Amino acid sequence: MSLTTSFDVDFSDTVAIITGASGALGSAAVDRFLEAGATVCAVDVIGPDDEDSLLERDPATESDLAFYDADLTDEDDVAGLVDSIVDDHGRIDHLLNIAGTWRGGDHIEDTDLSEFDLLLNINLKTAFLAAKHALPHLQETEGSIVSISARSSLEGGEGDGPYRITKAGIRLLTETLAEENRGTVRANCVMPSVIDTPMNREMMPDADHESWVEPLEIADVMAFLCSDGAAVTSGAAVPVYGEA
């Protein structure tokens, strides 16, 4: 994936954990942080060689990219993941909580508990556990956390309530992390509208795709929020709506 970045950041000698790294937004974030000089620990249940993975391996940067297979809904797995990353790379400077999914279509009374649990686990529990176990190391490096909320989480809506609820939880988790770590770890989140991904185009073929935001554009904002340029910003929920 080629990058056209609007500004430069320098993440040399830093280590970034990026969850959901095999998806469209996750792989864009991997590319952006590699381009900025970070060592990237890409985390997903889908490996780079899986046919569903969008995580590309560039030989020029592969030495700075390490893939970790982990179930981020399992606390023992997350604890082991963080220990492995620190053993391998010595530190953690950035945590990007990108792992997530969408489900919708039913009103609350028709929503299966299994669907609610799925969204709660993948969208919110993964971010909670990753932050919980990465925080001691982020506190040592005075690092940063950026998570993915959603524009739709700002209000209730019809048919995708559990998704909105979990993404609103990301905002509150972000604000809590920022408050509890004031002066040490910065925590922010971004709120996309509709991201221009192959899956979203397939689901909404008749939509105005030109108004959607590109994954690399969101990755750019996430890089800025982890950079010294955003040193005074913590607890923010940043709109990344494109023209939607």
Image (cartoon, rainbow, N blue to C red):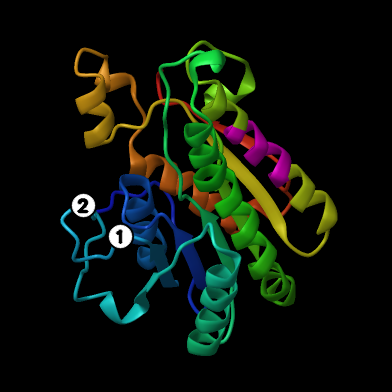
Instruction: Measuring from the top left, give residue 155's x and y in whole percent.
Output: 63, 16
Looking at this view, is 185 or 120 the one in front? 120
Crowding at dot 1, Cα within 10 Å, few <14 / some 14-19 / many 20+, comes out as many
Q: Amino acid at mark 1?
A: Ile
Q: Quadrant of residue 75?
A: bottom right
Crowding at dot 2, Cα within 10 Å, few <14 / some 14-19 / many 20+, comes out as few
Q: Are marks 2 and 1 in contact (CB under 8 Å)?
A: yes
In the image, is 25 to the left or to the right of 146?
left
Q: How many marks?
A: 2
Upstream in the sequence, badge 2 or badge 1?
Answer: 1
Instruction: Measuring from the top left, give residue 81's x and y in whole percent.
Output: 51, 75
Bounds of the magenta segment: 166-174
Q: Amino acid at mark 2?
A: Asp
Instruction: Measuring from the top left, give residue 187's x and y in whole percent.
Output: 68, 52
Please name the residue shown 29% across and 49% down the image.
4
**Residue annotated with mark 1:** 46
Q: Secondary structure at mark 1?
A: loop
Q: Which mark is residue 175?
A: none
